[in-house]
Image (cartoon, rainbow, N blue to C red):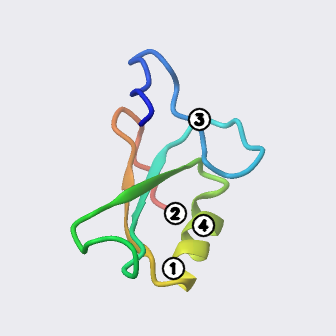
Amino acid sequence: MSSPLPADEPLICSARGCHAPAGWALRWNNPRLHPPERRKTWLACVDHRGSLGDFLDARGFLREVVPVAGSPTLDT
């Protein structure tokens, strides 16, 4: 199990090759593998919120998209 990030470490977008700060948490689960209450999280920057969300949603995995704590709410 990995250790939590230090409080001063910036949260970075989960998209491959992206190093932008994350503003959104895409909370998901795979119903074939996870109990209904379990949530995994991908982080997304403004540019990748849509594509990462679309990927998860197309598979029926996306449960919610919420702003990352400490970031402004970006309604797009």
Give the residue at x 78% y 44%: 17
> Would you call the spot at circle 3 few (<14 residues within 10 Å), some (14-19), or many (20 or more)?
some
Q: Residue at x 32, y 60 (%)?
A: 39
Q: Where is mark 4, residue-wise?
A: 50
Determine the secondary structure under disc 2.
loop
Q: Name the mark nearer the viewer: 2 or 1.
A: 1
Q: CA distance from mark 3 to mark 2?
A: 17 Å
Q: Is residue 68 left or right of residue 42?
A: left
CB contact under 8 Å: marks 2 and 1: no
Counting from the top left corner in percent of width and height, residue 72 is at 41, 40
Crowd rating for badge 1 (residues with CA inside 10 Å; few <14, some 14–19, many 20+):
some
Residue under pointer 1:
57
If you read the primary sequence from the N terminus, does the residue marked by circle 3 or circle 1 appear first?
3
Choose the circle earlier in sequence order: 3 or 2: 3
Residue at screen point 59% across, 47% down: 45
**C-alpha gap between disc 4 and disc 3:** 15 Å
Residue 76 image label:
2
- Residue sticking out furthest to the front: 1
Q: Quadrant of residue 12?
A: top right
Residue 59 at x, y percent in the picture = 54, 83
User: Are there few (<14), some (14-19), or many (20+) residues within 10 Å of tag 2?
Assistant: few
Q: Nearer the viewer, residue 11 or 37?
A: 37
What kind of residue is marked 3? Pro
Which amino acid type corresponds to the residue marked 2 in the rendered image?
Answer: Thr
Frontmost of labels 2 and 4 is 4
